[in-house]
Amino acid sequence: MAFKRVFRGGVSTPHHKNTLKSETSVLGTPEKVIIPMVQHIGAPCTPTVKKGDTVKVGQIIGNSDAYVSSPIHSSVSGTITRVEPMLYASGKLVMSIEIQTDGKQEVYEGISPPEVNNREDFLKAIRNSGLVGLGGAGFPTHVKLNPPKDKDVDSLIINGAECEPYITSDYREMIENPTGIIEGIQLVLDYLNINNAIIGIEDNKPDAIKLLAETSKSDKRISIKSLSSRYPQGAEKMLIYATTGRTVLSGKLPADVGCIVLNVNTVSYIAQYLKTGMPLVQRRVTVDGSVVSNPQNVSVPIGTSLKDLFDFCGGFKSQPYKVLMGGPMMGIAQYSLETSVIKNTNAILAFDKKQGDLPEEWPCIRCGKCIQACPMNLLPLELNRLVMADKFEDLDRYHILDCIECGSCSYSCPSKRYLVQSIRIGKDAVKRKVNRV
Amino acid sequence: METVLIPVAIVSGLGLIFGIILSYVSVKYEVKADERIEAVRDVLPGANCGACGYSGCDGYAQAVVDGASITLCPVGGAGLVDSLSEIMGTGGKASEKMVARVMCNGTWDKVTIKFDYDGILDCRSVSTMAGGPSSCVYGCVGMGCCEKVCAFDAIVVENGLAKVIESKCTGCEKCVAECPKDIIKMVPARSQYAVVCSNEEKGAVARKNCKVACIACRRCVKECPQQAISIVNMRAIIDTSKCDNCGKCVEVCPTNAILKCGILCD
């Protein structure tokens, strides 16, 4: 057995990958979709259409001039009924476009495979495709693929770890579309002039490892690395360490250690876009949780409401107590089923009271388990103490901004303290202070 | 006997000599401390709130004598500026006494509750969760961050709404900086009327989310004899520099979003 490099800290969570075997089903066209103008990290888009306009699949409906941004396309054909701030996954009101579908799903005339001959064309095509990191964070891919000139990037890391419990949308991509993933990797390697790609997959998905190894056999640049199944293996910095042994220091980016990290779904989408020219309008979402009747992977148009999605999966067995967008470790709780699936939504989970209830908080016994669990080498108990005492000025000294909010500390705390939540308050306070000066 | 007297004589002699030297030096090399620092320190309120931007009242006294503006202390108000300008021999326009006011009147019974909140009871944390459990995402979440930060016990949180006791408020603005919803505003203490709503949604939506929301119906705008009211971002705002406290706006407001508040009503 090969030696596996394991990052320090983290937790062993139960995997609950109930939907591993479920082939992706396709949700047809919902009656209406709500497409928010913020689906990525960076500048929000402004609507380029107005109420009453008719749009077709793949037509641009929101765009922005900012570099760190990504255009937004219509995922359906139909008529625009509302352009106003609407409820967003984060619970805030965000400018959104509601489209009443006509069921025809006519494809926009301007859609054709882009002409790509060099690196510039490639990056431009990626931007036009509206592609953002499909793993969860939603960072615009064209920005990621264009690291500063002085950074010597020599490795492309493909993230197939999928370390969060329940989620299997990346796994299904690896099983259903291995050739697409490999093609996508080859495209990125060719245009960015990189000679080394490593696909990191957790060892609880042996069939995906085998399948991708077989598919990539002919290309010597691509290697597969089996990773230990430990949360948060799929976090960028942990993944880089596990695959290359390099450590991304505090405040640095993967490009500083010569790496670009992309999700498996993201690369396979690159291959698909260059072939068809169809922008990012559809994605796979894992629907699971204790109260969902038929847990499965569903391919849905972006903008589909959670209600339509749950209805497609047979509705609820019992009243859901908590609905999460994202995995159980990092997902955001939703209070309304009106919110819609966006580009970086990889899972929607619904739990009953037994599983979804937040345990009561007890005093810290200073056992240090959170310190052992923290993959970023922080002291969550100290951060929690400082935040609760409003001592924000000390937080910087404890490197609070390095926290990736993975939730390992809260998960391992025997007193069930709300560590991540308090750290979020602290991060927010520190960021506000930084901005103010 | 002699063995005792000699050391005593030596020590006394040394003491005398050093005493003479020290008293000479202290007169010759005296550092003249500005007596105005002491005087300024005496008239400052002594709250040490830091609202002036200096480290307490001592720091500000030193700064005033060093040439800082004499109008920075909001706690002392107009009287203080007069006495400071007398000490410093400069003229100064009095800063108007300002108080904080929470621009929200949506107690738990006036809004609908969207969900049960679990977790840290802190305004900042609650408001990251879908803007808080209240149906109005602009309003007060009522967890009392401002109450905690107020050094003068001038804020109380009741029924999910923070309220400033304006007679106790010194205008230090700490609550303004603390509020994650930005609904605490500084207003001149003499102004008695305010649109206590921060909702920027359209009238119908705002009304649905809170029974006492400003629905931007413009009735107060039409009624105001001073033309002090305007609608900005779907809610009425009273220009306190024009308002003469006539109170006609309160009478016409259909949702009771305009209230008579201020020191007189505490």
Image (cartoon, coloured by chain):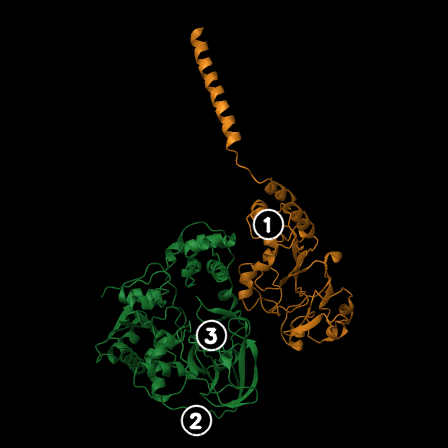
Tell me the residue that label 1 is attached to: B49
Amino acid residing under circle 1: Cys
Asked whether the beta carbons under mark 2 and mark 1 sit within 8 Å of each other, the answer is no
Instruction: Tell which of B234 and B87 is nearer to you.
Output: B87
- Alpha carbons under labels 1 and 3: distance apart: 39 Å
- Alpha carbons under labels 2 and 3: distance apart: 28 Å
Please tell me whether residue B191 is drawn above or below residue B229 in the rendered image.
above
The picture places residue A256, in percent across and down from the top left corner, at 32, 66
- Closer to the N terminus: mark 2 or mark 3? 3
Question: The numbered mark 3 sits on a residue in which chain?
Answer: A
Tell me the residue that label 2 is attached to: A109
The picture places residue A140, in percent across and down from the top left corner, at 40, 75
The picture places residue A86, in percent across and down from the top left corner, at 56, 77
Q: Is residue B144 visible?
A: no
Chain drawn in green = A
Relative horizontal placement of residue A129, taking residue B128 as reference (left or right): left
Tint applied to chain B in the drawing:
orange
The quarter of the rendered structure image containing the N terminus of chain A is: bottom left
Please tell me whether residue A386 is drawn above or below residue A154 in the rendered image.
above
> Where is residue A274, by image quadrant?
bottom left
Q: Is residue B13 visible?
A: yes
Relative horizontal placement of residue A246, taking residue A378 as reference (left or right): left
Amino acid residing under circle 2: Glu
Disc 2, SS: loop
Question: The numbered mark 2 sits on a residue in which chain?
Answer: A
> Where is residue A372, by image quadrant?
bottom left
Tell me the residue that label 3 is attached to: A43
